[in-house]
Amino acid sequence: MAEATTEQQALDAYSAIVTTVAEKVLPSVASLRIGRGGRGFGGAGSGVVITPDGFLVTSAHVVASGNTATASFIDGNEYDVDVVGADPLSDLAVARARSDKLQPVTIGNADQLRVGQLVVAMGNPMGFSGSVTSGVVSGLGRSLATADGNGHRRFIEDVIQTDAALNPGNSGGALADSLARLIGVNTAVAGMGLGLAVPMNATTQAILAALMRNGRVRRGYLGIAGGTRPLPPVVAEKLGRKAGVEVHEVVTGSPAAGGKLRGGDVIVSVGGVGVSKAGDLQRLMVEATIGAKLTLTVLRGDQLVNLDVVPVELP
C-alpha cells in the first residue's frame, strides 16, 4: 500500500510540474496561419511571444510561404502578424503581431540543459491549438542540416533532441523547462518518438536580435569545407584541446584562398579563439568579422602557422 502511495505521489508531482509549465507558457504560444499575399492560405505552425510589444519567434520554414499571418491565442484573441525577418540557416524567424498587450515567455538558456531533464512542448500540432506534450531531453549536441535556398548549407549545432511528441504544426512552438522558461524552438520531427528543437542560448539570441533589428542576419564567409580532426598529442597538450577543424576544400577566389589556406591545414584558432569543430567556426563568423582581418592559427604538418584572412559577407 505504501508503494502504491509513493507511485501516486510521484505521478502527482510530475503532473503538477507539467500543468504549472503549461499554465505559464501557453498564453504566450500562438497558432500561426500563414498568408500568401492575397493568394490564400499558405501553411500553418506555431509561434512564441518574446516581447510584450508583439515580437514572436517561430521557425523560418513556417513563414517561408508568405510574409503575413494571423496569430490566434488560447484566450480567443486573434491578431494580424507581419513577418519581420527569417534566417533559414538557423531555421529561426521573427514576426510581429499588431498588439502591444501580449504576454511574453521567460527565456532560458539551453546551454544549461542536461540529458534526462524534463521538458514540455507546446504548439499547434495537426491544427489542434494549445496542445501540450511532455518528455525528457533525449540528447544534446546534435546537428541539424539546413539550407538557405542559394546553395549555402550549414549545420545548426547543439540541437536539442527530445522524446516529447511533436507533429506537423508544432514547428515554431515552445520547448520549455520545468521552470517554464523557453529553452528551445521546436523545428523538426526526425522520426517516431524523436523531436528536435533549436536551442535558446547566446548564439540564437544574437540571431533573433539581428532579425528584429535588420530583418536579416549577416554572416562572414571564409570559403572552406572542413570537419573535425584529432590533434597530435603534443599539440593537443600545448593548446589544451583535443581537436581542430581540418580544411577539406578551399573555394577558388575565396577569402580562405587569399589567405593561403590549403587542404589538409587544421584550423585550431580564429582571432585567438579556439575551434574544435565546424560549428565553432560557424559561430565565429558573425557580422563583425565581415571586412575585418582575422588571424587563423593552423597546424600545417607539424608546425603551427598564423595566416591572415578577411571574411566577406555570405551572399
Image (cartoon, rainbow, N blue to C red):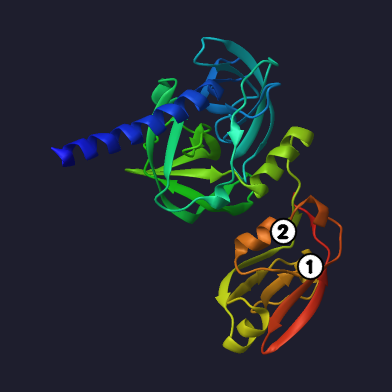
Callout 1 secondary element: loop
Q: Is residue 123 visible?
A: no
Callout 2 secondary element: helix
Reading the image, the residue beneath label 2 is: 284
Residue depicted at 73% across the width and 38% down the height: 209
Q: Residues within 10 Å of mark 2 (few under 14, many from 20)?
A: some
Q: Residue furthest right?
A: 292
Residue 239 sits above or below residue 183 on the image: below
Instruction: Tell which of 250 and 182 is nearer to you.
Output: 182
> Which label number is shown at residue 315?
none
Q: Residue furthest top?
A: 76
Residue 72 x %, y %: 54, 15
Splitting the image into 4 quarters, where does residue 265 fall? Answer: bottom right
Splitting the image into 4 quarters, where does residue 260 fall? Answer: bottom right
Residue 122 sits above or below residue 282 on the image: above
Report whether 144 appears left or right of 302: left
Residue depicted at 41% across the width and 33% down the height: 17
> Callout 2, which amino acid?
Leu
**Mark 1 → mark 2, Cα distance in angstroms:** 9 Å
Instruction: Tell which of 181 and 275 is nearer to you.
Output: 181
> Callout 1, which amino acid?
Gly
Residue 296 x %, y %: 76, 72
Reading the image, the residue beneath label 1 is: 271
Residue 25 x %, y %: 52, 27
Residue depicted at 51% across the width and 9% down the height: 76
Instruction: Tell which of 240 and 252 is nearer to you.
Output: 240
Report whether 100 appears left or right of 59: right
